[in-house]
Amino acid sequence: MKKKICLLGSYGVGKTSLVQRFVYNKFDEKYLSTIGVNISRKTIQLNESEISDFVKNIDLFIWDIANIEKFDSVAKSYLNGAHGAIIVSDISRPNTINQCIEQANNFLELNPKAKIVFIGNKLDLAENVIFDKEKYHLNFKSFKTNVEFVSAKTGKNVEEIFNILGEKLAEE
């Protein structure tokens, strides 16, 4: 089973770092802004008990998309045909939440049957940042989907978030 998923979010929230951690198990401290889109591929194996017996592996084609400031024909071409999205915010920058909501709405308008998951990245900064997990969940409540917290830097929950989305995609 092959599935196209997109990573969406503001600039600097760690989309590329999440892909690097998930696909290559590495993290680079240097910030490199994505221009356009980078596509990576990784196969995940799901537990048979969580889904039907005949689905075991999902090839994820991960589209790491640069910050979409305007929802134009270029943005639509990147998002078109996606089966799912991981929509990323930065827990140290609460203003990134609003863009997540806007991008989720635009994404689902283009791909109404797609599955989405929201994440708050940079959990490794939690000791230095005040953020309210409950308030985070409330922001995304209307989407009726998972809201998770991860750290691309440490790897905490990164594998899990892709597996959560993979399980949602396998249910189709």
Image (spheres, rainbow, N blue to C red):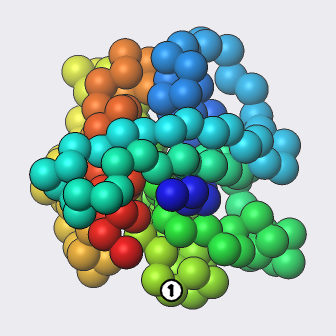
The residue under the point 67% across, 15% down is 30
Q: Is residue 163 visible?
A: no
Seen in the image, is 36 located left or right of residue 169?
Answer: right
Across the whole image, how many numbered discs are drawn on residues? 1
**Which quadrant holds residue 8?**
bottom right
- Per the image, label 1 sits on a secondary structure element best described as loop
* Residue assigned mark 1: 112
**Which quadrant holds residue 15?**
top right
Q: Name, please, the residue furthest toward the front.
A: 54
Percent x, y for residue 171?
31, 69
Q: Can residue 44 be seen in this view?
A: yes
Q: Nearer the viewer, residue 164 or 88?
A: 164
The residue under the point 17% across, 54% down is 50
114 lies above or below 128: below
Quadrant (top left/top right/bottom left/bottom right) for the C terminus: bottom left
Percent x, y for residue 155?
37, 21
147 lies above or below 81: above
The residue under the point 76% across, 42% down is 38
36 lies above or below 153: below
Seen in the image, is 170 located left or right of residue 82?
Answer: left
Percent x, y for residue 56?
35, 48
155 lies above or below 86: above
**Which quadrant holds residue 90?**
top left
The residue under the point 42% across, 39% down is 44
Percent x, y for residue 47?
22, 44
Answer few, some or many: residues within 10 Å of disc 1's Cα (few below 14, many 20 plus, some between 14 and 19): few
Amino acid type of the residue tagged 1 in the rendering: Pro
Seen in the image, is 77 located left or right of residue 1?
Answer: right
